[in-house]
Image (spheres, rainbow, N blue to C red):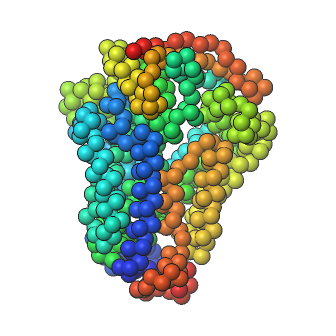
Amino acid sequence: MNILKNSFLGRALAKDRRLGLFFVAFASIQLLAQLVTADVTPFFLYGMYSDVLHPEPTYVRVACHVDGEPLVQEDMPRYAGELFFSTLYRFEQLDANGNEELFKPFLDKRFGWLSESTRSDLAARMSYEPEQRPALEGWVHRYLVRVLGEPIGTVTIDRELYRYEEQRPVMITRTNLMTVSR
Amino acid sequence: MNAVFSAEQRKVLLRIYFGWILLALLWRWMDVSMLSQLEAPVLGNVYKDLTFWLFQLLGIQDGLTAHSGIALVFDIILTASVVLALARPNGVWYPRIYCTAILLYFVTHTTYANHHYRPIIGLLFAGIPFAFRSLDRFGWSFQALRYYVLFLYTSAGLYKVFRGSWLNMDQMTNIIENTQLELLLTHGDGWHAQLFTWLLVHEWAGWALFFACTVMETLFIIGFFTRRWDVALFCAAITLHIGFYFTMGFFAFELIVLDLTLLPWGRILQSFGATTKVAGASPSDPTQV
């Protein structure tokens, strides 16, 4: 009992009950989220690369060309590059999965207390439909113009498939995902 | 054992923490990553994060990005709250506004970044102690932040232990092959790509680094029992961040601000002349003198 009383939380509870209870509640939710590995921002799960990774037969790269010149993430400001290329990678995944989203089963499981229509509406809001493609293409162009700070004509986005041979990546196929011309 | 900071010390700490936060925000302004600079993004991802879904239910992400005017007002409020907190370090309302705004920014930006970049949460937690008016509560929450940092690193190490990745000999090889494909293709002759290639060839070295990382992270558990090793743990945290950059190309600037809580602020602030008010401090407590 003394250990508990002398612990940080024990002393916080004794000194300032409201603040102590806040800490206890926070720690409890954090531990619960950790145990069930549920993402509940701002309760942070820092499990970076903790899952056992296995070698993949192939790796996907999304390649971007602006007016014929290659544009890679390292050539862009850090956060802009992460945002832009992560969006392209998500688009590539959606395209590869036939635009199928996996959110509805998740919503049904974790948000069962919401009405069916609300859950369907939420899933629809976060899904990607082919009709949205012009809007997405427009955004790709607008954001690149803003980041690069110059007018641009054509943007092409390709999916490239690689495998590693003697620790070096070798391209297997390349297919066009998107071409935007303005 | 509790360090209760004086008003003067709180002011100095606020300037250090919010100075760091201001740098982080200015970096994002320069990198075209504030909400008003996102050009009304179309494709988002809320992952399986319950909070993100609740925000989506309330329409917050759309509401903050669909109109550039609203997004600009939001960005100005967020940045101004930091500047004003620095200008008026005795106030608590600016840190409170900041904490609310940075949470909204975090969820909205991460949704449209299509990348669950969690370290930005460091910017939220760094501001929380300053939202308390009472110096006692500030002191307690500042200490709580220290425990939270210890928890983050320890849990990161334990995840690797319990999930078995620390014994996976080709874990680092698979991380590099997964994440550094673009660098190997486009800057293959650069020093960073050469390092990655060397690690791919010498798989044992990559595994040794991953193993060392797991051990270093797990050792943060020491901090729950004593403050004696806090400076060493701070150095370990910085070493880990540098290591992550060299071996994974990942640099969590936003998380480092939390590592600052491991520094012996009591001693540092006294040596710079900020007066200390100590309640129940034990002589063995190295955050105190």
Residue ID at (46%, 41%): B31
User: How far across and down, in percent of the image, does residue B7 sit?
Assistant: 35, 79
User: How far across and down, in percent of the image, does residue B201 sit?
Assistant: 79, 35
Q: How many marks?
A: 0
Q: Is residue B22 visible?
A: yes
Q: Is residue B19 left or right of residue B170?
A: left
Q: Is residue A91 visible?
A: no
Residue ID at (46%, 36%): A80
Residue ID at (42%, 57%): B21
* Residue nearest the observer in this picture, B49 or B260: B260
* Residue nearest the observer in this picture, A173 or A127: A173
Q: Is residue B250 above or below residue B154?
A: above
Q: Quadrant of residue B29?
A: top left
Residue ID at (27%, 36%): B68
Q: Residue furthest front?
A: A150
Q: Quadrant of residue B81?
A: bottom left
Q: Is residue A88 above or below residue B249?
A: above
User: How far across and down, in percent of the image, does residue B75 sit?
Assistant: 31, 46
User: How far across and down, in percent of the image, does residue A182 sit?
Assistant: 39, 15
Q: Is residue B111 above or below residue A24?
A: above
